[in-house]
Amino acid sequence: MIPVCEPVVTEAEIAAVTDCLRTGWISSAGKYLDAFEQKWAAFCGRRHGIAMTNGTATLEVALAALRFPPGSEVILPTFTIISCASAVMFNGLKPVLVDADPRSWCMDVRQVAERISPRTRAILVVHMYGHPVDMTPLLRLAEQHGIAIIEDAAEVHGAEYLCDHDTAVPIWRRCGSFGELSSFSFYANKLITTGEGGMLLTDDDALASRCRSLRNLCFQPQRRFFHEELGWNCRMTNLQAALGVSQIDRLPEIVEQKRSIVATYRRLLADVPGLSFQVEEPWARSVAWVAGVLLDDDHPLDASDVMTRMKAAGIETRPFFLGMHEQPVFRREGLFEGDRFPVAERLARKGFYLPNGLALQPAQLERISETLAGIVIADPHRKCAA
Ligand SMILES: Cc1ncc(COP(=O)(O)O)c(C=O)c1O
């Protein structure tokens, strides 16, 4: 079976993790943790990094740190992982959704203005599958309405966005450098991984210290077991940071490899009718986190049919997200009733991603492409039985 993704761990990372084990610095303090926080914040152009257990916890802490009144609304894309909506719900806030953009598959920024109400307090911007969201209109809206921006940059380590691309003086900026807080995941399939892990970044000193307190059970510096507030234990360990920190130097090379895998799929599958890829906008430098493909609307097969056949041929794939408005857990509560998001619904039914691990060989990319082309072209009218 060709796996959809496999992490590549180098000798430098093994040496750093071994150093933690040999010196006993295995818990949530240590030089690798400090270095990881500082280095990742600096790489993204931010002042503070607060490392945590995963990218779900970072979103929960980010929203808690901003202290919105209960019932405040947060605008986010429907086409995303459940972590975004659950972070909103667990904080007693109300998720308000927008559809995906049919080209970039990121949130459709044109829909955000019409979803802003007097109760809106934040936009949770989710960069999708390696590609940045069009930030400029969102930053303008946020300023105009006095609302916060939280970036979920879990899937875009190192991606860049051309700010103010509609003006004469555009500037490239890294994803994760915008708004009040930005959030990252370092799960095993991410470009930089600590196995499980996450980090919040901010330029705001007060927010940074609040996030540090929230991730550490709100222990007080002066009186440890005295609590004014409730927090979480979502501290990252020095061991995890040791695994992650030296990958920051390798990131440009990892990005090039990921982009080259997607470019190869595009070339090998260019003549296959009925398939399309995520469009890289001229104002974006995608890091090609996944190699997503989308079947045409009128193709008789759904993504699940193709994925079953790929699996039978020894090739692992993954489905796209199912929109938040289609999730039973929210429907049961009557949330998003009457909301229709046709682009996200199409992506969920027709989209999936191909293997793009760094260890993939050219012959494997050819085999995957040939298999996919065969399934999509050869026999499109027979529905898969499985
Ligand atoms: C956009 C997005 N946000 C948040 C998360 C959650 O991160 P984690 O798996 O580290 O909790 C993910 C995970 O893949 C993600 O893709």
Image (cartoon, helix red, strand yellow):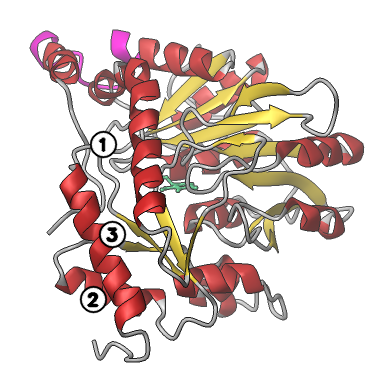
Q: Which residue type carries mark 3?
A: Ser
Extent of the magenta region: 21-33
What percent of the width, then of the height, locates residue 66? Answer: 68, 35
Tell me the residue that label 2 is attached to. Answer: 309
C-alpha separation, residue under disc 1 versus residue under disc 2: 30 Å
Point out the tag, 3 or 2, that comes first from the N-terminus.
2
Amino acid at pointer 1: Gly
Helix, strand or loop status at disc 3: helix
Mark in front: 3 vs 2: 3
Residue 115 higher or lower than 330, as above or below: above
When the figure is inspected, residue 217 is found, relative to residue 288, above or below; the finding is: above
- The answer to which quarter of the image holds residue 209 is top right
Q: Residue furthest left?
A: 22
Q: Quadrant of residue 52?
A: top left
Foreground of the two, 4 or 27: 4
Q: Residues within 10 Å of mark 3 (few under 14, many from 20)?
A: many
Q: Earlier in the sequence, mark 1 or mark 2?
A: 1
The residue that appears at 22% across and 22% down in the rendered structure is 239
The dot on residue 369 is 3
Labelled disc at residue 195: 1
292 magenta-colored: no
Q: Quadrant of the C terminus?
A: bottom left
